[in-house]
Image (cartoon, rainbow, N blue to C red):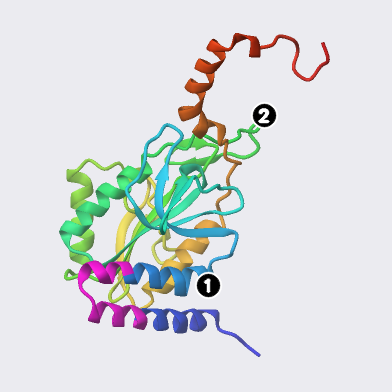
Amino acid sequence: MNFDLSQGLRAVSMQITEGCRQIYSCLDYRAARGELRDYITREFLRRYVPEIYGIERGYIITSEGHSSYEQDIIVYDKTKTPLLFQHGNSQVLPVEGVHITTGVQATLTFEDLERSIADIEKIKKLKKSAYLKPPTPVYRIREFSELKDYFNVVSYVLVYDTPHTLKELTEKLMELNQRLGISPKHQIDSIFVLKKGVIFNYREVELGGKMQFMVLEDTHRAYVDTEDALQLFYLSIMSRLGRVWMHGIDLREYIKVQLEPRVLKYLEKNAERTLGGTPGKAD
């Protein structure tokens, strides 16, 4: 039996898109956003993304105490990333374990776009530093001419519809990034509009070749009208997850911000508990 993967994914994406249409048509903006987020997460991503990756709603923090705004969808490595805190349906996750974030919206106006730009800039400025570094570099990553031990977070926006054309939305995205002084490495990577198409990136040498869903220093903005926006959203996630890896997270870096000053103060008051000798050897 022959199986056409593209046709299979298209059938699934059409089913999910129809579910989104029903949600959008019968709920107001705020309620529709929440329902769309939960529906796409529950019915699509958790079914088709490998189980080694967690998919949650919540906040991203650094070991220095900096935090993102609440994110609709966070894709992270479930095998190496601890949940730092949970409150209701929201999780708090260390930035070192996060690979992808996605803001889900019922519609996208120019005002919504400006808020999304600021939100994603804040995410991408979160510093990954609390990881267990190997004694010698085994493999390093170069993104934006920087050689690092980790991959940057990729951030998307997924919406059901927009009152603007994709051309207008693309031009506005570029204009806002320039006016607000957003560095390319802190920009929205791609925008997926279920009813219209995708705003993505391309390299001049790759016109007619592969789409780039991640902003890179030598890419340019482009858009395409397509009914396969949800399918391309899924492919962008799987392409990224197929490439990334991470070191283990050094949770001590998160704990010491709160715990270390208290421990040192305790030891100062209880000097008899500080013993000499060589660790690991009998004295």
Q: Which residue is mark 1?
A: 47
Q: Which residues are magenta?
A: 18-34
Q: Looking at the rendered structure, which numbered label has been put on residue 135?
A: 2
Is 21 covered by the magenta stretch? yes
Give x and y (percent) for residue 178: 21, 45
Q: CA distance from mark 2 to mark 1?
A: 38 Å
Give x and y (percent) for residue 203: 39, 55
Give x and y (percent) for residue 279: 74, 17
Total marks in image: 2
| Depicted 16 relative to depicted 73: above or below | below
Q: Looking at the rendered structure, which numbered label has been put on residue 264?
A: none
- Alpha-carbon neighbours of circle 2 within 10 Å: few (<14), some, or many (≥20)? few
- Alpha-carbon neighbours of circle 1 within 10 Å: few (<14), some, or many (≥20)? few
Secondary structure state at the residue bearing disc 1: helix
Horizontal arrangement in the rendering, residue 155 relative to residue 96 (left or right)? left
Is 24 covered by the magenta stretch? yes
Whether residue 229 is visible, yes or no, is yes
Query: In the picture, which quadrant includes the N terminus?
Result: bottom right
Query: In the picture, which quadrant includes the C terminus?
Result: top right
Query: What residue do we see at 30% from left, 41% from top?
Result: 183
